[in-house]
Image: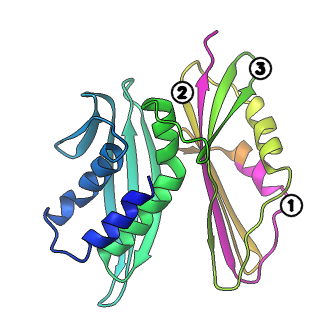
């Protein structure tokens, strides 16, 4: 997967072969085909084996100057049942394409590898951990992404030793329907002030957010943030 980013960085020095508004869908198509996955582009979506789910992205420009750019990219995976998994990643760089590259890299480390494991039968165990979780009346395969760390200069990021155990305990108390569900974790610390946002199926979960907020996160005079993506799939046995 990550070898693809090296090629993309080299390609950015050349004249783009596609209009800017099409660049992201081409990037995602190349992510998939670089793994031997049969994918094609239709309109603004990437399809695998001509079937659901469909992968798309929307870019928003947050700030652009002559020497820098900040973007937000909303990646959407449209499921066959009509729902969409939406994960947003920020990126910054010397121009828009470099900023997109950072957002794409975060997506790859986070949700994309989980998508590959769960929907396209391409599992990379060094990138996605699979655990068996339970709720009151169901068992789940939890596909857990790597942790995405962002830190300011000279700042180290850490997390509570019991982070995953306590998150799993909180999830065990949820009433979840018999279909796929997804959890997006975001924690940030700036000058000892913490921001926590935990989303369940794209919506903020107050219960999960408060559980994670109550953990013993390291304080920091500078800045750090951590993100993680988890997909829960019911075990039908």
Q: From the image, which quarter does the C terminus lie in?
A: top right
Q: Position of residue 143 (x, y in %)?
A: 61, 36
Q: Nearer the viewer, mark 3 or mark 2?
A: 2
Q: Is residue 141 left or right of residue 97?
A: right
Are the residues tagged 3 and 2 within 8 Å (C-beta)? Answer: no
Q: Is residue 115 left or right of residue 23?
A: right
For label 2, count other residues whose C-alpha is less than 10 Å away and answer few (under 14), some (14-19) or many (20+). Answer: some
Disc on the earlier residue, 3 or 2: 3
Residues drawn in magenta = 209-237
**Mark 1 sits on what residue?**
216
Q: Would you identify the image quadrant in which residue 22 lies?
A: bottom left
Depicted 3 relative to depicted 30: above or below? below
Q: Is residue 173 magenta?
A: no
Are the residues tagged 1 and 2 within 8 Å (C-beta)? Answer: no
Are the residues tagged 3 and 1 within 8 Å (C-beta)? Answer: no
Q: Position of residue 84 (x, y in %)?
A: 41, 37
For label 3, count other residues whose C-alpha is less than 10 Å away and answer few (under 14), some (14-19) or many (20+). Answer: few
What is the distance, in whole Å, between disc 1 and disc 2 at their CAs?
A: 30 Å
Residue 28 numbered tag: none
Q: Secondary structure at mark 1?
A: loop
What is the distance, in whole Å, between disc 3 and disc 1 at their CAs?
A: 27 Å
Residue 180 numbered tag: 2
Q: Is residue 42 left or right of residue 120?
A: left
Disc on the earlier residue, 3 or 1: 3
Depicted 150 relative to depicted 236: above or below? below
**Mark 3 sits on what residue?**
136
């Amino acid at each position: 997967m990550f070898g693809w980013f090296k090629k993309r960085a080299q390609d950015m020095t050349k004249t783009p072969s596609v209009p800017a508004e099409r660049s992201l869908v081409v990037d995602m198509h190349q992510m998939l085909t670089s793994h031997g996955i049969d994918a094609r582009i239709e309109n603004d979506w990437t399809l695998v084996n001509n079937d659901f789910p469909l992968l798309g992205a929307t870019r928003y420009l947050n700030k652009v100057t002559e020497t820098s750019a900040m973007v937000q990219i909303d990646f959407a995976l449209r499921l066959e049942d009509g729902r969409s998994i939406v994960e947003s990643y920020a990126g910054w760089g010397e121009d828009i394409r470099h900023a997109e590259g950072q957002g794409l890299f975060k997506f790859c480390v986070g949700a994309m590898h989980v998508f590959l494991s769960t929907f396209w039968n391409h599992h990379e165990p060094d990138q996605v951990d699979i655990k068996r979780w339970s709720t009151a009346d169901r068992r789940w395969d939890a596909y857990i992404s790597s942790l995405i760390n962002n830190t300011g200069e000279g700042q180290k990021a850490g997390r509570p030793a019991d982070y995953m155990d306590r998150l799993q305990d909180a999830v065990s108390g949820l009433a979840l329907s018999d279909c796929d569900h997804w959890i997006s974790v975001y924690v940030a610390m700036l000058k000892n002030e913490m921001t926590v946002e935990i989303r369940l199926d794209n919506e903020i979960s107050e219960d999960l957010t408060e559980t994670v907020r109550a953990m013993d996160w390291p304080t920091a005079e500078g800045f750090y943030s951590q993100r993680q993506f988890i997909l829960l799939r019911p075990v039908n046995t």
